[in-house]
Image: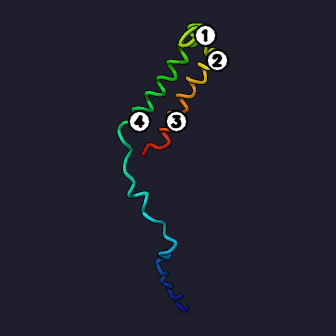
Amino acid sequence: MPKSQVRKKKVYTPPTDVRPTSTAATRKPSPIWLPATAVGLIVFGIGWLVVFYLSDMEYPVASWRYWNLAIGFGAMVGSLGLLSRWR
C-alpha cells in the first residue's frame, strides 16, 4: 500500500498594513492618585448616604432633601468612571 505524503503547512503571518499598532504595550501605568481618589469617592458616597438615612434626612444638608441621594450615588458613579481608566 502506498504511503501518503505529508504536506508542510506554511506559517501564517498577517500583512503589515492590517497588523495593529503596539499602542497597548506603550501605555503607561496609572498614576498613584487614581485608585486612591476612586476609593476615596466610594467611601465618601457611602458615608454621605449613611449619614443621610440615619439622620432622617436632616444631615448632611437638610435643604437639599433628596438631592443628597444624588450626591452620594454620584460620587460612587464618579469613582466607577475613574476605575474604568485604571491600568
Q: Nearer the viewer, residue 59 or 35?
A: 59
- Outermost residue, bottom direction? 2
Q: Position of residue 45 (x, y in %)?
A: 51, 23
From the image, tell me which residue sits under label 3: 80
From the image, tell me which residue sits under label 1: 57
Q: Give the alpha-carbon distance from disc 3 to disc 1, as whole Å.
A: 26 Å
Q: Does label 3 or label 1 sit earlier along the sequence?
A: 1
Q: Does label 2 or label 1 sit earlier along the sequence?
A: 1
**Disc marking residue 42:** none
What secondary structure is marked by label 1?
A: loop
The residue sitting at 54% across, 92% down in the picture is 2
What secondary structure is marked by label 3?
A: helix
What secondary structure is marked by label 2?
A: loop
Q: Give the alpha-carbon distance from disc 4 to disc 1, as whole Å.
A: 30 Å
Residue type at mark 2? Tyr
Q: Position of residue 48 (x, y in %)?
A: 52, 18
Residue type at mark 4? Pro
Q: Where on the picture, by quarter, is residue 26? A: bottom left
From the image, tell me which residue sits under label 2: 66
Query: Does the CB distance between marks 4 and 1 fall below 8 Å?
Result: no
The residue sitting at 46% across, 78% down in the picture is 11
From the image, tell me which residue sits under label 4: 35
Query: Does the CB distance between marks 2 and 1 fall below 8 Å?
Result: yes
Residue type at mark 3? Leu
User: Is the residue marked by circle 4 packed among few (<14), some (14-19), or many (20+) residues within 10 Å?
Assistant: some
Q: Give the alpha-carbon distance from disc 2 to disc 4, as whole Å.
A: 29 Å
User: Is the residue marked by circle 3 packed among few (<14), some (14-19), or many (20+) residues within 10 Å?
Assistant: some
Looking at the picture, does residue 67 appear above or below residue 23? above
Of labels 2 and 3, the one closer to you? 2
